[in-house]
Amino acid sequence: MTKKLAPIVLFVYNRLNHARQTLKALQKNELANKSVLIIYSDAAKNKNDLKKVAKVREYIKNIGGFKKIFIHKAKKNMGLANSIINGVTKVVNEYGKIIVLEDDLVTSRYFLRFMNEALEAYKDEPEVASIHGYIYPIKDLPKTFFIKGADCWGWATWSNKWSIFERDGKKLLNNILKKNLETEINFNNTYNYIKMLKDQIKGKNDSWAIRWYISAFLKDMITLYPGQSYVKNIGFSDESTHTKNKTDFFKFKANLIRKFNFSKIPANEDLVTRKKIEVYFKSIKTSLIKKIKFKIMSFFK
């Protein structure tokens, strides 16, 4: 294990219960007391959120369990995308590497170890964009594997890799169309990432993550994933800012890894596992369609 651990950057807003669960899990991580934690607290975007934001800020000012804690409180609402893009850029340029979490991600106690060991192992591999802690609930995956692009549910990267991030969604879309990459980016048309990018361009969503994924994809860069998740997302509820959908994908509760043993693998995309992810995406779509049809039939009955 490298002596210089990556700083953990946590983005919070107005969900006290979620932030509490995220921080309690993080405090239980093996390397928490040796790690620097930097928290970015966005300001309320309206009067209804003022008290909620205040409660979150009151909570985070009293937490412990880390080597050092720094808290940045925005004076004006920046929104999730700007908060993350600006915060990540500032911290990763200062420290050279970074581990990023949002306030609805509960981690295994081995999450930080996985992130730090993988960051050290692949720091000199130019094709590796990032390390990711979450993986879909798919059976019989390799212990670790690489997939083209980047991801957003508990991730880590380096300053030179983050530098390829493109803020301008229009530029990304134009490059996709020039290179005829729509089908590949959409995992053989099983998940519509292109629509997500188009919606970001139109202002229908404020996703930094879709731009990160496609920025890495267009550079032919890959991300390391675990075969079993180190992260579960607890954010898909009525309190969620951006997503309230409840498909099987969102309902999944990770069976967080209880043992840890990292070993480096060659930095090449795993096309067999990519195909398994396509099958999983397709099954989600099929499952959702069946649920919708069932509700329609029930209504007419």
Image (spheres, rainbow, N blue to C red):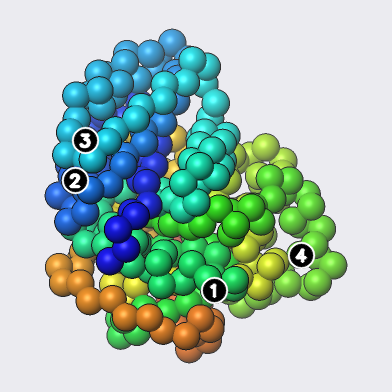
Mark 1 or mark 2: which comes first in sequence? 2
Q: CA distance from mark 4 to mark 2?
A: 43 Å
Please state if 116 lies on the left or on the right of 79 as rendered. left
Label located before the other in sequence (3 or 4): 3
In this rendering, the answer to whether 277 lies above or below 2 is below
At label 4, which amino acid type do we have?
Ile
- Dot 4 falls on a residue whose secondary structure is helix
How far apart marks 3 and 1 lie (CA) works out to 36 Å
Which of pointers 3 and 2 indicates the residue nearer the eye? 2
Query: Which part of the image, by quadrant, shows the C terminus?
Result: bottom left
Which residue is at 19% across, 45% downward?
A: 33
Q: Which residue is mark 3?
A: 20
Mark 2 or mark 4, which is nearer the start of the sequence? 2
Vertical side of 86 occupied by 190: above or below? below
Mark 3 and mark 2: span between their CA atoms? 17 Å
Q: Is residue 137 visible?
A: no
Label 4 to label 1, Cα distance in Å? Answer: 24 Å
